[in-house]
Amino acid sequence: MKICFAMRKLMFLFIILCSFSLNAQDISSIKELLKSYEVKLELNEVQTSKFVLVLEKYINKLYDEDIDNTSFNKNNKLRDLEFYKLLSKEQFDVYKKVKLEIEPTLKFRFN
């Protein structure tokens, strides 16, 4: 009985630690993405703070390996639309060109 309880505690602790490490990976990848886009798009402070929020909003949705093509394309377009509203026309034109350099996995998927 005591062994079973100890195993449950150990498993719970393991799950908590894994979730923290996954969250830390998301944060570091968001920072890397932001750094790349910030340089290429010449974002100002306001744009940068909003840009990171959009990245955070969509990072798990777009980088989920089990996502179907339709959902992926929908979320990819929604993210682009949010960036379109945030950036100037010139910046968005640059964004469209550098997006696939910075995030090559985000190209449109066909069924």
Image: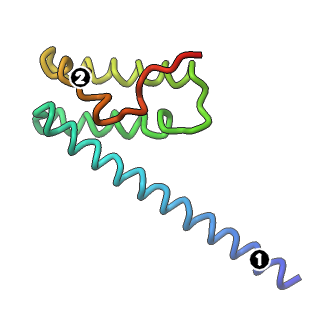
Q: Number of marks in the image?
A: 2
Q: Amino acid at mark 2?
A: Lys
Name the spot of residue 36 as percent of width and height, x first: 21, 41
Residue 77 in the figure: left or right of residue 67? left
Residue 76 in the figure: left or right of residue 34? right
Spatial CA span between label 2 and label 1: 51 Å
Q: Which residue is farthest bottom? A: 2
Above or below, comparing residue 42 to residue 110 in the picture? below
**Alpha-carbon neighbours of circle 1 within 10 Å: few (<14), some, or many (≥20)?**
few
User: Residue at the location (54% across, 59% down)?
Assistant: 19
- The mark found on residue 7 in the picture is 1
Query: Could you tell me which quadrant the N terminus lies in?
Result: bottom right
Residues under numbered marks 2 and 1 in contact, where contact means CB atoms less than 8 Å apart:
no
Classify mark 2: helix, strand or loop. helix
Classify mark 1: helix, strand or loop. helix
Residue 46, picture quadrant? top left
Name the spot of residue 70 as percent of width and height, x first: 57, 18
- The mark found on residue 69 in the picture is none
Q: Amino acid at mark 1?
A: Met
First of labels 2, 1 by sequence position: 1
Name the spot of residue 102 as percent of width and height, x first: 29, 36
In front: mark 2 or mark 1?
2
Q: How is the image coloured?
A: rainbow
Name the spot of residue 64 as percent of width and height, x first: 54, 38
User: Residue at the location (38% across, 40% down)?
Assistant: 56
User: Residue at the location (83% across, 83% down)?
Assistant: 3
Above or below, comparing residue 85 to residue 100 in the picture? above
Which residue is disc 2 drawn over? Answer: 97
Query: Could you tell me which quadrant the C terminus lies in?
Result: top right
Above or below, comparing residue 109 to residue 18 in the picture? above
**Alpha-carbon neighbours of circle 2 within 10 Å: few (<14), some, or many (≥20)?**
few
Residue 105 in the figure: left or right of residue 2? left
